[in-house]
Every structure is written in C-alpha cells, then in structure tokens.
Image (tube, grey):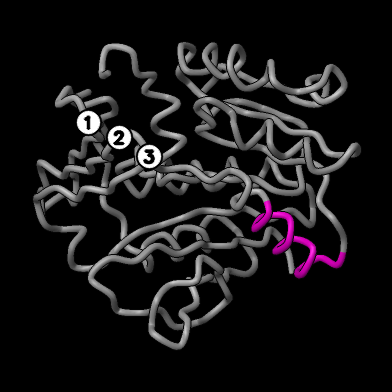
Amino acid sequence: MAEQADRHELYEASVQDVVEETRFVAATYQALRGRAPRGLREDFCGTASAACQWVRGGEDRFSIGVDIDGEVLAWGREHRLSRLSPTERQRVRLLNGDVLTVTTEPVDALTAFNFSYWTFRTREQMRRYFERAREALADDGIMFLDIFGGSESYVMGKEKTRHDGFTYVWEQTEFDPVTAECVCHIHFRFPDGSRLRRAFSYAWRLWTLPEILELLTEAGFARLRTYWETEDEDGEGTGEYAESARGLNDPAWIAYIVAEKST
C-alpha cells in the first residue's frame, strides 16, 4: 500500500482542509472590511489546493500560488488545477519562485498556512518576509497565518492519528533550546503493515506567538488579531475560530494570526 500511495494526497487528507481555510479567510475579511475579498495569494502553496479552491467561491475571484518547489507545483497543476473548469483555471496563476523576491499584483488576502513560514529562522529573514508580504497586499489587504505552540511542541516524540485507510504520524526528532530550531517528519502507516517513512520533513525554527506578533508590527502591519478555536459545553473543540486577545494555555494549541495592512 505504501508503494501505491501518493504522499501529496495523503498530506491533504490528513493535514489540510482547504474548504475551511478559504471559508475562514473570506468570512474574516468580510467581517473586518465590510466587503467580499477577490484576490488571494497563497504563499508556500505546495500543491496549490487552496488557490484552486479559492476561485471556486466566486466568478470574480482570482488567486496566485507561490512556491519554490517546482516538483510539487507540477503535481498541483496535474492533479488540482486540472480539476477546475476552463474559466476557473484562467483565474489561477502558479509561480515557481521565492516569496522573498517574487513580485505579484496586489491581493486582498495573503496566506502562509501549515506553519510553512517557519522555514525562516532569523528575525531578519522573518521580518523581511513580512515586509514583502505586506507590499504584496492591496491598501486594505490582510495577511493570514497559522501558528502552533504549547509545552508539547518542545518535546521529542510521535503523535498518531487514524484516518480512513491509513495512519498519520507526526514526529519531532530534534529541538535545540539555544536556537529554537527543530526537525520534524510526517510518516504514513497502512493496514497491510507497510510504511511511508519521512514522506515530508521540516527543519524549522519554533517561533512563539509574541515573537511573530512583534515582527509583524516591525514590518509595518497596522493591527494584529488572534483567533482561537472555540469550545463546546464539554470543553471540546468545535472547529470554529473566534477572535480573542487571550489564548488557552493548552499543552498543544493552534491559532490564526490576522494582520491588517492598514486600519
């Protein structure tokens, strides 16, 4: 089963939810700006699934996907872009380039999800990326980031999640407390006992939420908001996110950061 598996399909089935991601971006932008967003740039877009999903949401929408990995972009063109109608495909542009240097037309919303921006390991690199992202936004544009944290994020180990037909395994193998650099891998296991080891590997800096907020401010963003998952009456997560100035001190948490270019 591992030999027949497609790692990109498995990743999207276990990690991404582009329908929910694009819904959150559109709804949050509408709430803050009083109008529906049109243009989206998906940085570190990978297979560009979100960029493709975005244009399905309206005939006036367009999207730009940027990724430095040509192989994964080619996969996205074959398996995701090809699923769109001819008119939808015309409203998607995929660029094989570096987010630090690429120049694109202004967009209403710019996303860097799945913690991909953590590839920048110094304050100078991260601030420069945020400055470039801000430049890519329209005057009333908004940048959307996700971030994780909590005490468990500093602990070596594995976390397993069962899905239909496979098990997703997240493993953190290294963490340096001096630099906050970490190494993580994604593995997949299958019912026949076969495994797809290190289907994806990441060498990141584990950034804290205050650090990212400070760097966004230094990059010139006018207002910052954090959105946290709401809980039901039993204390279980609902999958919905709401703005809150205070977070939950859970061992493991995920939040959204919404950075407005101007007030």
Q: In the displayed image of the protein, which residue is found farthest to the right?
A: 60
Lateral position of residue 211 relative to residue 232, left or right? left
Picture quadrant where residue 51 is located:
top right
Q: Element type at marker 2?
A: strand
Q: Are marks 1 and 2 in contact (CB under 8 Å)?
A: yes
Residue 133 in the image: state x and y as whole percent.
Answer: 60, 43
- Of residue 44 and residue 139, the one placed in the foreground of this image is 44
In the drawing, does residue 48 fall left or right of residue 114? Answer: right
| Residue identified by numbered label 1 | 191
Residue behind mark 2: 166
Find the magenta span and give its range: 23-34
Mark 1 or 2, nearer chain start: 2
Q: Amino acid at mark 1?
A: Pro
Magenta region's main secondary structure? Answer: helix
Residue 56, given in percent of the width and then of the height, sits at: 78, 37
Query: Which residue in the structure is indicated by mark 3?
Result: 164
What residue appears at the point 68 percent right and 31 percent down from the top-left corner? 52
Identify whether 29 is placed above or below 86.
below
Q: Earlier in the sequence, mark 3 or mark 1?
A: 3
User: Circle 3 sits in a helix, a strand or a loop, which is it?
Assistant: loop
The amino acid beneath tag 3 is: Asp
Pick the front one: 30 or 101: 30
- Cα distance in 3D space between marks 3 and 2: 6 Å
Q: Residue at x 39, y 30 (%)?
A: 10
**Camera-side residue of 10 and 199:** 10
Q: Which picture quadrant has residue 247?
A: bottom left
| Residue that sits furthest to the front in the current view | 192
Answer whether labels 3 and 1 touch (C-beta < 8 Å): no
Up the image or down, 43 lies above or below 261; here it is: above
Question: Does residue 70 show up magenta in the picture?
Answer: no
Q: Are marks 3 and 2 in contact (CB under 8 Å)?
A: yes
